[in-house]
Structure formats: structure tokens, C-alpha cells
């Protein structure tokens, strides 16, 4: 009996055990399910009216408004509806041929654009929108009138008075930046201003916004790389609509989620969100903002969007999308779903929403009637804001009137550049220098032009840059946005030949002032070691001077002597705007460049040449290394042939000194122009053309040019000598024009 009872007890325990395990499993599943539930949010919790919600079954779903009060939601809907109607109005203007000649509709990006604009703090943060960011800018503080003024390219457009393409919205007065059409290049500007924020200890943030296709650009990688390396307060927002015009994202990126390729970047927080959903987008932007303000690094918000329309008015998406795709996007429409959400959760009645909509439509109509009558830019205004005013005018004669101190040191070219930079760094604490190898312990520049700068001014003001020329120039453009008294000197590249990757950023710099109608100009001096004669060969011997002079909006100077190097650098570092400061590296330590340090108040005017050797028989115009050859040739011709050669040192290429040159032409009636740049396309051609057009009646012979061969610079010394212009080439050319 006892044995039977034990068997029964054992069987009972065995039957009970699975039940206990099942209960434990049920409990674990319950905990797991609870962990997946959204955390409670402070603020209102709304109850869904399923009967009303059923009326919107044609949409893919509703949003979750939990935690947001009615006043906030009213503001959001007002902006969502207002922005969409403005976007539709833009298309109407196009059809009527009244303006908005470039229109990139944003419908389908509504959630993320609203969130960006609401996260941006006007007059504090720096917002860099792109051409599709209409709602971003509207939510960020640009008014309906200002949106319409931009779209219709009116003179009162706050972005730039109609100088930039329509649909490129900006308002510099509240720090919404005027961004160019070069896709994604404003990422480096955002990084640059973020660098300034960090260096000055500010609590602002920089916000970059663009599409997913821009992430394929090399300079976007450079921007993220710099932001992560320096741990900067910048948010990169990627609005991914899966199309770069007509090119699908899989052709642009190894992953449809283009942010995934950046997840390995140290210090970078990557956040994914639904860019159609204002609530999810807003939470993502707030999370990014909190992270960036903590000082832990930059953030990247990747927002999945739909581009409901074509890329722009010049594109037809029906050529590469199916009707089914387009119909599915309509079901995901953010504005329709937001409206449905407000009704289904009974936050607003139909009448309340209609009142908001009617107020928006009335505002647009009344504002449009006003804006359409406003004046277009005056045709003659093209000449305004090409370049800022100089500190000293052309007529300044201080270099002759204010003589050097008798005890002033005698320096060579390299030393003169160094002297001037140190002077200006002492004078203005808001000066900065960066480039490759400029702050490497005792090296401090491959030519030692920056020697001692790091020691005296420290790593906060003098620091190395990565081997990324676009980054060097682009971040300089960005940093100057933080405050007007910031002046930046950069070594644009170790050798001028390596500057090519930065050309798009240089172009950007040259039209900032004009494009913004004078509201912004980067105060940047771009230093470059230029030219050959050092047996450097390819990528170490080119002269790029004519390339830089081609573009309006920047000054280009080319000092040869130490005193000019000092006077021009002083002027460049005090003047507003961009100056390309070309340094003939063959002459860095050449004895012929020696001169006394000029008086402390001497600034060499831009565009003012100097007669280095008076003469009566022929005018010889030059600059840089060929100027030294020209002076040598002039002396030889005087002794050997009795020919009196007037040698003019241009010093400044853009602008160049027509007054001095023309006066010399009237005196000598013969002209030779010598430069190291290859013959074809050299700056000498521009000078020769101007002389022929304006001074033809004074010429007794054709204007001749002597220059380097139209050939890459060879490395072997015999090849270099044959290709680069030599003293005997200049001598023969002068003799030709004299004997004509």
C-alpha cells in the first residue's frame, strides 16, 4: 500500500511540472511583450475612435499622437497644410509662366521637414537646408511672403534678391543659410561652423539637410569624417526618397539605407526614422539634438521618405515609375494621414481643421497678391556685391610715404610671409590657421612657412587638417559663418597642384558674397606654394594662377619680394572676402627676394602694380619667379644692347593694375608679358587682350607673350628646363619686339 501511494504522489508531481513550466513560459512572453511596448510619454493620451478610423482605410495607417497637446498639434497641422499648399502654388506659377522656374516638390518628406524646422532654433542654431526643404524653412522661421519672394525671384527675396535659383530658401538673419545647388557640399560648411561652435564653447548646433544621393559624393564622406574626428556638434539629416532624380538608390549606394555605411564611424550616433511621420521624425531629431548637445559627437538622422512628384519641373517621374508605385505613395501621404489621425483620435473636429485650412488659403492668396506686384531685381544691380571693399584703396601710397624703420630686419620671401601671419595673429585673436603638416610639432609646414605659429598661438588656433583639400577649404567657408571677425588662413594644399579636389569649394567661396546679396562672405586667405624650378615634376610644379583668376569674386595676389608678401598678407587678413595668396616656392629662400620689413601701417593695395625698374624702350610685365628672370634680363639688355626695359611687377592678378600698365605702354609703345603659367590660357593673354583693345593707338609692335610650354612639367632637370620659361626665352622675346 505504501509503495502504491508513493507511485501516485510521483505521478502527480510529474503531471504538475509541465504546468509550472508553461506558466513560467507565459510569464516570460508577457515580460518580452511588455518590453516591446512604447515607453509612457508625458502629455496627453488619446483614445482612438475606431468607427471614424475606419473611414480612412484607404490610407496605410494613422500616426501615434500620444504625448503632444492640442495646441502643438494645431501648430503642426497649420504648418503641414500651409507648406503643402505653398508647394502646390509653386507648380501653378510655373504653369502660368509667372516664375518659380525651378521647383523641387517636397510632398512625401513632410514629417522629417517639419521636425527639422521645429528643432532648429532661429538666430541661434545654423541650418543648412537643400533645394527641397520648403517645409523645413517654413517651420524654421521663413514666412509665407519670404517663400513666395524667393520662388518668384523678387528683389526683396531675403535669401539673395533673386540672385540664386528659386526654391533655394534661406534667411541669413535668422541663420538659415544660403546654400548653393552643388549637391551636399554644404555638409562641409556645417562642419566648419560646428568647429567654431566647439572652439568658442557655444551651445548652438549645425544642422545639415539633403537627400540620400548626396551621400555618394566624396565631400560628404569628408564632412562626416571631419565631424567625427573632431567630435563636432552637427546633425546630418538624410531625406531618403530612394531616387536621385531618376537613378534608384541601389545604383547610388550598397544599401537602400544609406546611413548604414556610416555606422562604423566613431562618435557618430545614427538614428533611423519614418520621414513621413511627423511624430517619429520629431522624436528622432530631438534624440539627435540631445546627443549632439551632450558633446559626445555628431548625429545622423536617416529618414525614409516618398518623393510623391517628379524630381523637379524639368523631370517626369512617369518615365521611370509605375502607376502602382505612385498610387501606393499616395496612400502613405503624410498630410492626409496626419489629418485623419486628428479626426480619428477626436483631437479636432472637421470644422476645426477646415478653419485652419481656410486661414492658410486666405493667407497665401493675400500674400501672393502683394508679392506678385513687387519689383524684380534691377538689371544694373548685377555689379553689386561681387567682392567686398578693400581695407586700403588703390590710391593708398603708404608703402612709399611710410618708410621702414632703419633697424627693421631684412627678410626673404618665406620669412616675410611668416612674419605677416604672426603679426596678424597677434593683432586679431579670432584668426585661425590650418592645413596639411602645418602644426606637426617642430615640422610646421613642409616649406616651414608656418614655423613657430603653433608654438606661439597653440593648437586651438593653429592645427593640422586631414589630407582632404575639399575639407580644408569647405570648413573654412563654414567656420567664418560663426562670427564676422573670424579670419582664416589655410594652406589649401601642400603644393598648388594638389588643390584640384577643392575647386568646387573654391568656386563656392567666390560667389557666396554675390549670391547672398552681400549678406555673407567667408574671410579666407588661401595660401598655395606655386610654380616649378625645384625639379618637382607632376603635381609639384604647376602654376594655377590663371585658373584662379578666371572666377570673379576672389582676389588673386602673387608676391615676389618679402616686403610685398608682408603688405599683401596684412591686407588679405584684414579684408573681408576671399584672397588666393600664391607663393612662388622656388623663391622662398632666394636672396633676390630680400627686403626690409615695411612700416607697421603699410598694407599693399590690391590691384596695384609696382615699377621695379624704370625704362623707356619696352615694357616687361611679370610676377613671381619670371619677375626675377625679367629683372636679370633687363640688366643684361641695358649693358649689352643699350635697351631700356621698364619692368612692372603686377603683384596682384585679380584685380590687376591697368592704370600703371597703360601709363607704361604710352611711354614705351612696346610690351612683353612673361609668366610661368603655360602659354595657352595664361593670365598674360588677358592682359595682352586688354592692351590691344584699349591702348592699340600707342603700340608700335604686337604685344608678345613668353611663357612655359603647353606641356606637363617633366621631372628630369633637362625636361623641366625645356618646359618652364627661362631667362633666355624672355631675352629673345624682348629683342623680337624691339626689333619689330
Image (spheres, rainbow, N blue to C red):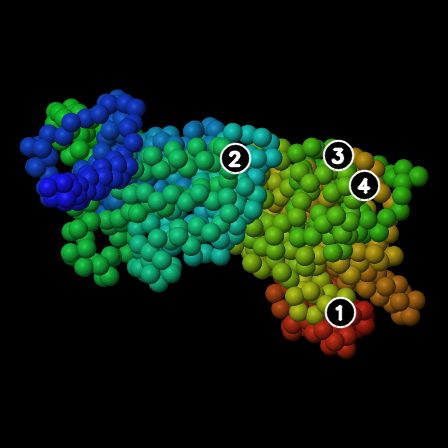
- Tag in front: 3 or 2: 2
**Up-down relation of residue 113 to residue 650 (above or below):** above
Residue under label 1: 535
Tell me how far mark 3 sits from mark 2, CA to CA: 30 Å
Q: Earlier in the sequence, mark 3 or mark 1?
A: 3
User: Residue at coordinates 78% horizontally, 49% vertically from top-left?
Assistant: 442
Residue 229 x/y as whole percent: 56, 46
- Tag in front: 4 or 2: 2
Label 2: how many Cα within 10 Å (few below 14, some 14–19, many 20+): some
Q: How many marks?
A: 4
Q: Is residue 360 left or right of residue 58?
A: right
User: Residue at coordinates 77% horizontally, 66% vertically from top-left?
Assistant: 534
Residue under label 4: 399
Q: Are marks 3 and 1 in contact (CB under 8 Å)?
A: no
**Up-down relation of residue 490 to residue 372 (above or below):** below
Label 1: how many Cα within 10 Å (few below 14, some 14–19, many 20+): some
Tell me how far mark 4 sits from mark 3, CA to CA: 22 Å
Helix, strand, or loop for circle 1?
loop
Residue extending furthest toward the bottom: 718
Tell me how far mark 1 sits from mark 4, CA to CA: 35 Å
Label 4: how many Cα within 10 Å (few below 14, some 14–19, many 20+): some
Q: Earlier in the sequence, mark 4 or mark 2?
A: 2
Residue under label 3: 426
Residue under label 2: 295
Residue 105 x/y as whole percent: 28, 46
Tell me how far mark 2 sits from mark 1, CA to CA: 47 Å
Residue 385 x/y as whole percent: 54, 40
The part of the image, by quadrant, that contains residue 405 is: top right
Q: Is residue 334 left or right of residue 488?
A: left
Amino acid at each position: 500500500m505504501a509503495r502504491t501511494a508513493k507511485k501516485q504522489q510521483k505521478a502527480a508531481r510529474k503531471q504538475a511540472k509541465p504546468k509550472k513550466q508553461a506558466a513560467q513560459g507565459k510569464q516570460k512572453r508577457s515580460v518580452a511583450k511588455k518590453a516591446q511596448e512604447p515607453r509612457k510619454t508625458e502629455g496627453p493620451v488619446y483614445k482612438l475612435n475606431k468607427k471614424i478610423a475606419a473611414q480612412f482605410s484607404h490610407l496605410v495607417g494613422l500616426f501615434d499622437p500620444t504625448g503632444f497637446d492640442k495646441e502643438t498639434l494645431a501648430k503642426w497641422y497649420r504648418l503641414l497644410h500651409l507648406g503643402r499648399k505653398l508647394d502646390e502654388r509653386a507648380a501653378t506659377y510655373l504653369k502660368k509662366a509667372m516664375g518659380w522656374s525651378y521647383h523641387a516638390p517636397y510632398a512625401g518628406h513632410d514629417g522629417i521637414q517639419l521636425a527639422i524646422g521645429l528643432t532648429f532654433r532661429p538666430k541661434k542654431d545654423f541650418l543648412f537646408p537643400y533645394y527641397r526643404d520648403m517645409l523645413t524653412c517654413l517651420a524654421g522661421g521663413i514666412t509665407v511672403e519670404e517663400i513666395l519672394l524667393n520662388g518668384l525671384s523678387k528683389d526683396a527675396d531675403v535669401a539673395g534678391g533673386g540672385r540664386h535659383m528659386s526654391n533655394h530658401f534661406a534667411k541669413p538673419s535668422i541663420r538659415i543659410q544660403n546654400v548653393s545647388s552643388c549637391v551636399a557640399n554644404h555638409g562641409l560648411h556645417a562642419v566648419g561652423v560646428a568647429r567654431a561652435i566647439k572652439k568658442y564653447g557655444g551651445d548652438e548646433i549645425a544642422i545639415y539637410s539633403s537627400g540620400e544621393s548626396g551621400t555618394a559624393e566624396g565631400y560628404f564622406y569628408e564632412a562626416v569624417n571631419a565631424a567625427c574626428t573632431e567630435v563636432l556638434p552637427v546633425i546630418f539629416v538624410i531625406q531618403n526618397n530612394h531616387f536621385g532624380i531618376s537613378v534608384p538608390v541601389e545604383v547610388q549606394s550598397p544599401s537602400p539605407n544609406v546611413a548604414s555605411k556610416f555606422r562604423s564611424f566613431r562618435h557618430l550616433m545614427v538614428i533611423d526614422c519614418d520621414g513621413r511621420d511627423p511624430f517619429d521624425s520629431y522624436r528622432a531629431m530631438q534624440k539627435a539634438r540631445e546627443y549632439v548637445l551632450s558633446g559626445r559627437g555628431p548625429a545622423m538622422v536617416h529618414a525614409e521618405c516618398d518623393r510623391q512628384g517628379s524630381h523637379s519641373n524639368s523631370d517626369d517621374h512617369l518615365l521611370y515609375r509605375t502607376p502602382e508605385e505612385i498610387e501606393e505613395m499616395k496612400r502613405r501621404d503624410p498630410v492626409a494621414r496626419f489629418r485623419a489621425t486628428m479626426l480619428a483620435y477626436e483631437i479636432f473636429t472637421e470644422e476645426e481643421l477646415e478653419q485652419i485650412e481656410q486661414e492658410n488659403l486666405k493667407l497665401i492668396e493675400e500674400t501672393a497678391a502683394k508679392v506678385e506686384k513687387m519689383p524684380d531685381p534691377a538689371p544694373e544691380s548685377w555689379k553689386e556685391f561681387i567682392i567686398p571693399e578693400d581695407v586700403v584703396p588703390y590710391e593708398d601710397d603708404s608703402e612709399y610715404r611710410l618708410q621702414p624703420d632703419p633697424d627693421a630686419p631684412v627678410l626673404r620671401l618665406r620669412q616675410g610671409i611668416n612674419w605677416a601671419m604672426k603679426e596678424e595673429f597677434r593683432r586679431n585673436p579670432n584668426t585661425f590657421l590650418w592645413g596639411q603638416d602645418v602644426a606637426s610639432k617642430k615640422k610646421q609646414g613642409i616649406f616651414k612657412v608656418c614655423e613657430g605659429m603653433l608654438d606661439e598661438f597653440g593648437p586651438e588656433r593653429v592645427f593640422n587638417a586631414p589630407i582632404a583639400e575639399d575639407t580644408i577649404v569647405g570648413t573654412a567657408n563654414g567656420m567664418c559663418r560663426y562670427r564676422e571677425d573670424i579670419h582664416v588662413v589655410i594652406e589649401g594644399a601642400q603644393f598648388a597642384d594638389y588643390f584640384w579636389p577643392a575647386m568646387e569649394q573654391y568656386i563656392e567661396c567666390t560667389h557666396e558674397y554675390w549670391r547672398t546679396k552681400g549678406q555673407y562672405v567667408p574671410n579666407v586667405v588661401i595660401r598655395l606654394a606655386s610654380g616649378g624650378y625645384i625639379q618637382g615634376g607632376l603635381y609639384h610644379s604647376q602654376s594655377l594662377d590663371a585658373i584662379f583668376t578666371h572666377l570673379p569674386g576672389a582676389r588673386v595676389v602673387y608676391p615676389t619680394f618679402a616686403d610685398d608678401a608682408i603688405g599683401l598678407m596684412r591686407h588679405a587678413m584684414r579684408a573681408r572676402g576671399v584672397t588666393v595668396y600664391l607663393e612662388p616656392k622656388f623663391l622662398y629662400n632666394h636672396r633676390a627676394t630680400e627686403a626690409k620689413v615695411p612700416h607697421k601701417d603699410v598694407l599693399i593695395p590690391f590691384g596695384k602694380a609696382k615699377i621695379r625698374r624704370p625704362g623707356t624702350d619696352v615694357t616687361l610685365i611679370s610676377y613671381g619667379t619670371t619677375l626675377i628672370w625679367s629683372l636679370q634680363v633687363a640688366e643684361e639688355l641695358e649693358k649689352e644692347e643699350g635697351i631700356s626695359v621698364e619692368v612692372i611687377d603686377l603683384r596682384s592678378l585679380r584685380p590687376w593694375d591697368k592704370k600703371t600698365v597703360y601709363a607704361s605702354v604710352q611711354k614705351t609703345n612696346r610690351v612683353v608679358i612673361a609668366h610661368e603659367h603655360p602659354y595657352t590660357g595664361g593670365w598674360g593673354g588677358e592682359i595682352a587682350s586688354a592692351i590691344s583693345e584699349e591702348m592699340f593707338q600707342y603700340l608700335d609692335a604686337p604685344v608678345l607673350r613668353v611663357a612655359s610650354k603647353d606641356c606637363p612639367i617633366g621631372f628630369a632637370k633637362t625636361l623641366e628646363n625645356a618646359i618652364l620659361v627661362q631667362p633666355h626665352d624672355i631675352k629673345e622675346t624682348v629683342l623680337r619686339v624691339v626689333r619689330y
